[in-house]
Amino acid sequence: MEEYSASVHAALPVHVAVIMDGNGRWAAGRGLPRSEGHRQGAKVFRQICEYGADRGIGYLTFYAFSTENWSRPQEEIASIMALFRDYLQEARERREENEARGFRLRFIGDRSALPADIVSLVETCERESLHQTRTTVNLAVNYGSRLEIVASVRRIAERVARGELKPSDITPADIEQGLYTAGQPDPDLIIRPSGENRLSNFLLWQAAYSEFWFSDVLWPDFTPAHFDMALADFAQRKRRFGGIEAVQKNI
């Protein structure tokens, strides 16, 4: 596989989102339990997260667990939650290292269904990294974009009911303010490995003008070289945002 150096990229995306997919198939192909695929996928997540930050990406969003994933076998769900718990505890243990990298940790999704100890760790990690500004890392857990949009619309409906807002005055900005990613730029680039070519209920509103990069490689086999390939491809795109002339919003 061809490797790309940093000098190749004329324009880096500000925000890269990644759908981490293929852990189960990776494990099945090796005769291993699905939990081993998730374990390897977690290692790759850490590697790509650090590499993306080192490349100068300001926002990194990783799709880890969707609202639909609760339908999976309980044993698999338990292993994913255990990995999430391990990551949060490790993040606290590596607080000084993460601060040196400038990581701000954010967790997007519905926390109400998560174990109480995980919610507590999430809140602690967010609070302790609040002052960091170099790279914001969003981890989407129990995330579903349709429900995210519905929740935002409900907040707007409540404002209308209280007489604070007229229906005729509602703007896209009002919806954006109620999303988990409020205050962040929309993803410039969405990467999906594993051979699937769909969004799977991920950042539906935010992806309106995102560029996509698909690959057949399974997530546990994803490497910094693959990440660089996606960045190099992005640098060649002509982004028009509905207009005629190419517009480069990310530089």
Image (spheres, rainbow, N blue to C red):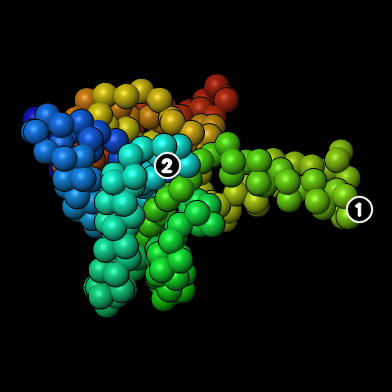
Q: Residue at x 26, y 63 (%)?
A: 86
Asked if residue 107 is positioned above or below residue 174 in the image, the reply reads below
* Residue 231: x %, y % from top left: 28, 38
Residue in view at x 19 percent, y 50 percent:
39
Residue corresponding to mark 1 = 163
Callout 1 amino acid: Gly
Q: Which residue ends up furthest to the front in the rendered image?
A: 74
Alpha carbon distance from label 1 to label 2? 38 Å
Q: Identify the element where label 2 is drawn.
A: helix
Single out the residue that lies furthest toward the right. Answer: 163
Left or right: residue 174 versus residue 12 is: right
Query: Mark 2 highlights which residue?
Result: 70
- Closer to the camera, 241 or 92? 92
Give yes or no for contact between labels 1 and 2 (Cβ–Cβ under 8 Å).
no
The secondary element bearing badge 1 is classed as: loop
Regarding residue 74, the answer to whether it shows in the image is yes
Can residue 48 be seen here?
A: no
Residue 174 drawn at (x, y percent): 71, 47
**Residue 13 placed where, x, y %?**
38, 43
Q: Mark 1 Cα within 10 Å, few/some/many (few <14, many 20+)? A: few
Q: Amino acid at mark 2?
A: Trp
Which residue is more in the foreground, 250 or 192? 192
Residue 58 is tagged as none
